[in-house]
């Protein structure tokens, strides 16, 4: 079973456990990801003689409080993604409707799978240094362990 294990940024040996915990709380379980247009959109752009938008690389936050994966609205705009449908989101701030877009989602870990065609909603998260919130629809069929004591998380596929 392939395993991806990631420890939060290294803390010097002499630092207290409190420093590692504070960093884990501040940063959260983040993964380097790449979001691009799916192959069918790639073909569409090429057939019209339009340039294919370059994939966007950045950080995605594993968000076990989110039922579905979402990308930042600026990512959807930069990739020129078409809206495929809408969904209702319920957050602490209330309920609202968001657009959903087709994406290609790749994790920059060789162990984690890529998704050539995945549908993601939008949210505004760039101000947190993120391009995506990776919701509970990602770990389906995988094991996700969030280890607060060791300040690391593990994903087994």
Image (cartoon, helix red, strand yellow):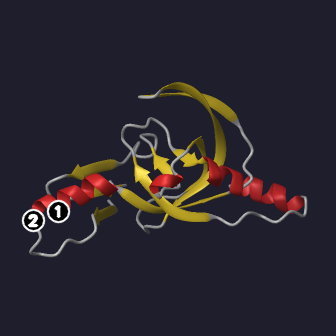
Residue positioned 29% across, 63% down in the render: 5
- Residue furthest toward the front? 127
Quote the CA–CA distance across marks 1 and 2. Answer: 6 Å
Across and down, in percent, residue 144 comes to: 31, 49
Is 156 left, or right, of 21 in this rendering?
right
User: Pointer 2: what residue?
Assistant: 16
User: Pointer 1: what residue?
Assistant: 19
Q: How crowded is mark 1: few (under 14 residues within 10 Å), some or many (20 or more)?
A: few
> Which of the labelled discs sits on residue 117, or is there none?
none
Instruction: Give the vertical position of 65 relative to 111 (above or below).
Output: above
Is 11 left, or right, of 100 in this rendering?
left
Q: Residues within 10 Å of mark 2 (few under 14, many from 20)?
A: few
Instruction: Give the vertical position of 87 relative to 66 (above or below).
Output: above
Residue positioned 41% across, 42% down in the render: 140
Instruction: Give the vertical position of 53 relative to 83 (above or below).
Output: below
**Which secondary structure, mark 1?**
helix
Question: Quarter holding the N terminus?
Answer: bottom left
Task: Compare residues 1 and 22 and report the one nearer the observer.
Answer: 22
């Amino acid at each position: 079973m392939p395993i991806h294990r990631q420890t939060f940024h290294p803390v010097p040996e002499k630092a207290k456990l409190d420093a590692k915990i504070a960093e884990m709380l501040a940063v959260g379980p983040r993964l380097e990801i790449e979001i691009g247009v799916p192959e069918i959109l790639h073909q569409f752009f090429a057939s019209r003689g339009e340039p294919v938008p370059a994939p966007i690389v950045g950080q995605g936050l594993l968000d076990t409080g989110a039922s579905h994966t979402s990308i930042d609205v600026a990512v959807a705009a930069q990739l020129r993604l078409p809206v495929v449908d809408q969904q209702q989101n319920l957050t602490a701030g209330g309920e609202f409707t968001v657009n959903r877009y087709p994406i290609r989602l790749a994790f920059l870990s060789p162990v984690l799978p890529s998704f050539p065609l995945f549908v993601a909603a939008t949210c505004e998260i760039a101000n947190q240094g993120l391009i995506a919130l990776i919701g509970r629809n990602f770990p389906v069929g995988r094991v996700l362990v969030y280890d607060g004591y060791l300040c690391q998380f593990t994903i087994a596929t």
